[in-house]
Structures are given as structure tokens and as C-alpha cells.
Amino acid sequence: MTLPKRLYQQIADQVRQLIQNGQYPAGSRLPPERELAQTLGVSRPSLREALIALEIDGTIEIRMGSGIYALSPAKTSNGQRSLGESPTELMQARAVIESAVIAKAAAAVTDSFIEALSAILDSMRAEIAEGRKPIDQDRQFHLTIAEQAGNSVLADIVANLFDERHSPMSDHMRGRFETPETWFAALQEHEAILTALDMRDPLAAQAAMHAHLTASRRRWLEN
Amino acid sequence: MTLPKRLYQQIADQVRQLIQNGQYPAGSRLPPERELAQTLGVSRPSLREALIALEIDGTIEIRMGSGIYALSPAKTSNGQRSLGESPTELMQARAVIESAVIAKAAAAVTDSFIEALSAILDSMRAEIAEGRKPIDQDRQFHLTIAEQAGNSVLADIVANLFDERHSPMSDHMRGRFETPETWFAALQEHEAILTALDMRDPLAAQAAMHAHLTASRRRWLEN
DNA sequence: CCCGATAATTGGTCAAGCCAATTTTTCGAA
DNA sequence: TTCGAAAAATTGGCTTGACCAATTATCGGG
């Protein structure tokens, strides 16, 4: 499916291609705004909107009175990966990071932590029973564990990887729709994780999380 | 130090605050462009530039003819963390992830991989000898290891965490300037990592990487 | 040849207008 | 009185043109 793209997005793509194919290597200065706008056949405000997008994703640097400079790809911020580019690698990365994170969380188990996870699973079960998709509870489960590890940088990464896995566009492109059966399987895997955490067993928690993410990958990619 | 902020950034911050403090909860519609511009005392093109920034970072959704809608924080993409917010946590996250990554890379060692790392360290040594900062070689060293792990998602995360640690703003704010001495120490730590990889010893490689990142944290935060 | 002043070039912000998509309102028929 | 279709209003999208501010280039005098 192709969404109609905003003009600023089209312009940004064109400029990004000029940089990435070497026409403007890193450090070089792009043509001035007015010239670029004319070359691309768009208005200056529209070009500026595109330049803002490129500034945000780290493709260019804008210096008032001086010009627009191409940045090296190494300096770009966390660009959005193309959807479907590495779904297997995405799930593998989740397995690596959430295994490390849950080991930390398992070393910091408290009764309230266990109760919070249990409440999330109760809510998840209720949603499944009503035929709804407990995507928010799924996210909350993983994020609560990540937060218990005590490192907000890791928690952010867990959240972002979760969102990449579950972005609406990602699901739509792959033609994947979860069913109550797949959600129930996920719930059972979550309960196994909770049991391992309740036992304060880091190795068991890691194994349960790894099994869950392996199964999730299978549900996502192989159906 | 405070860089003068672009107007669109200031506007975006204001709108983001309106959303985050509950004045426009997720799902609600913001005032129309023309009204918002008037309320904030800016022009419509400037407001539109801000709205593009907010659209990119997932704070809002724009629907032509319908309006501007606040999104829930859960849906936001990888927002930039405030600089200095968690430097300790940033380094801890790097330790967790790069330890996992180097274990994978150590299981996939090849002669050309070792040669590539060795060449990077040679280049790093030459830069240090000439009194320059081998920041690119430092990054290349970490990223080459991450890429050898065979997972582009993890490699991207390693690159992004490295860039967060070494963003010009981050260094400037903390008043930190590396010296030839600190770079030389980093080079020696890198050589220890290479030795462990050359021995195909995942545990030694993990320990060397962990020691390097611990020392790097100390150099960054405690001087 | 160098330095300071001026001009030119560059990005930043603004006002106003028109186009296109969506939503709301109105009107007429059943 | 209700419903559906058409028209109007509202919303975002894009453009043209103008002026302000920072940086760079040029020129003239010492």
C-alpha cells in the first residue's frame, strides 16, 4: 500500500538521495535554499519543511548565514529502519537485550514488582476474554520488567524495539493479524516469565523470556 | 551553555508541553493551525515547521481537512533523551549491550575481522601520535565488532549509544576534553579486546569490553 | 599587504492567498 | 419529522513574496 506522501517528505527523500549517492559528500555544502527550491520545483517554505525533517534525522546541519551542510551517515541519529528490513534481526535483538534486562530485573525483585506484573497479566487475560488485542498490556509487561532493571536507557530501547515490532504499519505490511489463540499463547509465556521472576531465578527468567521472544518471532514471521 | 534555539524548536517544545501536561490528552484534537499560531504569537509557516518536528517524533498526528491529534506517549518514536539525563545509565546500557554483542562476535571471528580491527587500532595509534582525537576510529572499532555479531538492529543500537556518548553537545556540556593520555588508555583497552577476540575467547572478550566501558565511564564522569 | 567597512549571500520568520480533504450545516423530498 | 444529498465551512497543504539577521565576500584606504 502506498500512502500519499506529504510534499516535505518527498522533498526530504530527494535531498537524502542526493547526499547518499555522493553528489553532496559529508561536509560539503548543499546549494542555498532558494536555489534548491527552484531546482526541485517547490516553494521555499516547503523546502524548509523538508530541511527541518532532514535536520532532525541528522542528515544535514543548517547554519544561519552560512549554508546547509551534509553530514556523514555515521552521524545520523536513529533513523527509522525500513519496515520489514530485518524483522528476524529485530526479534533477535529483542532477545539479546531483554534477556540481559530481565537478568538485572530478576536481581531486583520486590513483592510490589511481582504484584504489578500479576495485575498486568490479569488485565491482559480480561482483554483476551473480551476478544480484544491486549497490545497495551503486552507493552506494559515488557516495559515494567525493563524499568525494574533500573536503567532508563535500556528501558527506552526495550520500548522502542517493542514499538517497532508492533507498529501499525509493520503489522499491516506483513498482513499479520493476531488471533485470540496467539494472544493466549503469549499470555501463557508471560505467566512462565512471571513464575521465574517470582522464584528470583535469573537464569530461568532469561530462558522464559528467550522462549517467549522466539515464539513471538515465529508467530510474527512464519505464519 | 544555551544555544539559541530555532523558533520551530521553541514552538514544538511549547506544544509538547501542552500535550504532556494533559491539556490535550492522547486522542484529543489540538486547536486548528491558524488558531494555534495566533495563540502562540507566531506565523503559520513557523508553526507548521514545529508541527513537522512533532509529527516526526511521534507526538502528534496530522490529518488534512480534519485536524491535529495528540498521540499517546507510548506511540512516540525514539525521542531524544535530554543530554546528561542518565550518563551513568547510558554507560551501563552500553556495557550490557556491547557485552552481549561481543559475545556473539567472538563466536564469529574470522582472520579478516581480526585484521580489520587491527588496522583500525593502527590508525587510532597514528592519530594519537599526531595529537588528534581518534573519535572516528573509536566508533569504527565498536561498530565493526557490532557488525560482526551479524545483527543490524543491534549494530544500530551500538552506533546510536556511541553517538549519544560522544555527541558534541554532550561533551561540551560536561566540559570534558579528552587528552592524548586518555586516548592512549582507550587504545590499550581496545588492544586487550582485540587480543581476547583473537583468542576466540567470548568470556575474555566480554570482560575486556566491560573493563573498557567501565574505564570510559570513569574518564567521562568522574574527572 | 592587512584591516575595517560595506555589500552580497545565506538562513529565519512573516503575511497573505489559493488549493484540496474533511466535517458540518442546510435544504428538500419522502 | 427524518434522512440523504448538496453546499458551505473548516481544516490542513502549498505557494508567492517580503523583510530581518548572521555569515561571507569584496573593496578601498592606510
Image (cartoon, coloured by chain):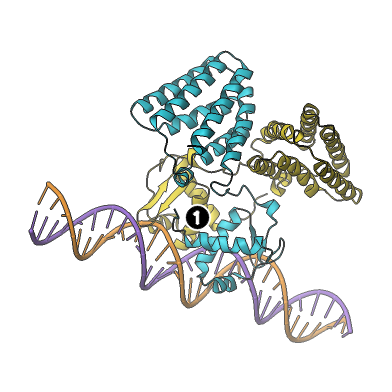
Chain colours: A yellow, B cyan, C orange, D purple
Please state the chain letter of the residue tagged with numbered disc 1 in the rendered image: A
**Residue at image coords 38%, 57%:** A64
Q: Quadrant of residue B24?
A: bottom right
Q: Is residue B107 visible?
A: no
D17 and B58: which is toward the camera:
B58
Left or right: where A174 falls relative to B16: right
Amino acid at circle 1: Ile
* Front in this rendered view, residue A1 or B88: B88
Q: Residues within 10 Å of mark 1 (few under 14, many from 20)?
A: many
Image quadrant where residue A191 sits: top right
**Residue A80 appears at what percent x and percent y?**
60, 44
Q: Is residue B45 above or below residue B178?
A: below
Residue at coordinates 41% horizontally, 55% vertically from top-left? A36
Task: Give the camera-side residue of A198 and B117.
Answer: A198
Q: Nearer the viewer, residue B46 or A40?
A: B46
Q: Position of residue B89 (x, y in %)?
A: 61, 39
Residue farthest to the front, as pictured: B223
Looking at the rendered structure, the number of numbered marks drawn on it comes to: 1
Direction top: furthest residue: B199
SS class of the residue under badge 1? helix
Q: Residue placed at 56% from the left, 49% from the top?
A: B82
Q: Which residue is mark 1?
A: A52
Q: Is residue A85 above or below residue A116?
A: above
- Residue A177 makes an appearance in the image: yes
Quadrant of res D19: bottom left
